[in-house]
Amino acid sequence: MTDGTTFTRAIVCPPADSYATGLTTARLGPPDLARARAQHVAYVAALEAAGVQVTTLPSHSDHPDGTFVEDTSIVTAKGAILCRPGAPTRAGEVVAMRAALELLLGEELDAIVEPGTVDGGDICQAGSHFFIGLSQRTNEAGADQLARWLDRLGYTSSTVTIRDDPTLLHLKSGLVWLGDQQLLAVPSLAAHPALSAYDVLTVPLDELYAANCVRVNDVLLVSAGYPRITATLAAMGYQVVPLEMSEFQKMDGGLSCLSIRVP
Ligand code: CIR
């Protein structure tokens, strides 16, 4: 078992009544709201079992994608910054998150500003280094602002362009840090030069959705239904916790999107 960041708190937001009207490219059919809420309850229970105190924000019908809280902010051990989501329909989510995070952290937050856009899902922290995904949601101006902010905090960063891979909405749809030098990546990213200093475990082509797992303290939350990568991770010593994610996958969401983890 390797070492990752230790998280003590997390912020989540259950799916809103309007959840099915959110953004999606998945073509997996409309989500079942009751099932999505049940899957969210199981996700929160898994966070709590991993030793995290969970703050649950109220959902709001004006924010159908509001359950994907990860995209609204980036929280590190040295400070937090509010994102400016690349999808204009998601701008209002940041307003609600600012109030919640400032209360939780007891400090005023920095923010990505126009013309920059950054979705938190494009930001993959690997210890003291951050990979910043350049995507349909995160632009160069946003990435530059974020890189300068991270530098002021003493972190390093590098960019990874994912715009040529239509299967990746966000960088963390295909790249996750598991602790120490270990990354998990989809095949299209595995050989990226920015990852060359790391050990990269590649997700099988028929299990791509499982790439978006999330390390929370001693456990690794993994989407249920992906036996090959789950077996590999378990054999490597990770304490794997499988979670049903079908109703979030229908809306292009994954495990990391459902929480902001606070060190
Ligand atoms: C969206 O398209 O913005 C949402 N339906 C899904 C966001 C998923 N977030 C993430 O991967 N970090």
Image: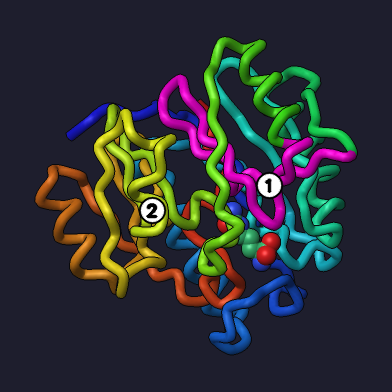
The one nearer the camera, 215 or 106, is 215
How far across and down, in percent of the image, does residue 139 sit?
Answer: 73, 45
Residue density around tag 1, few if under 14, some if 14–19, many if 20 or more, within 10 Å: many
User: In the displayed structure, does residue 151 sit left or right of residue 1?
Assistant: right
* Quadrant position of ligand 1: bottom right
Say which label, 1 or 2, has the lower sequence index.
1
Segment colored magenta? 115-142
Residue type, numbered disc 1: Asp
User: Which tag is nearer the camera, tag 1 or tag 2?
Assistant: 1
Residue at x 47% of width, y 24% of height: 129
Quarter of the rendering containing residue 133: top right
Quarter of the rendering containing residue 188: bottom left
Tell me, yes or no, whether the highlighted magenta stretch contains residue 59.
no
- Residue 241 in view, yes or no: yes
- Circle on res. 225: none
The one nearer the camera, 189 or 210, is 189
Residue at x 20% of width, y 44% of height: 238
What residue is disc 2 on?
A: 213
Tell me, yes or no, whether the highlighted magenta stretch contains residue 128.
yes
Residue at x 15% of width, y 56% of height: 232
Helix or strand or loop: what does disc 2 sit on? Answer: loop
Residue at x 66% of width, y 11% of height: 152
Ligand 1 under 8 Å from disc 1 Cβ? yes
What residue is disc 1 on?
A: 119
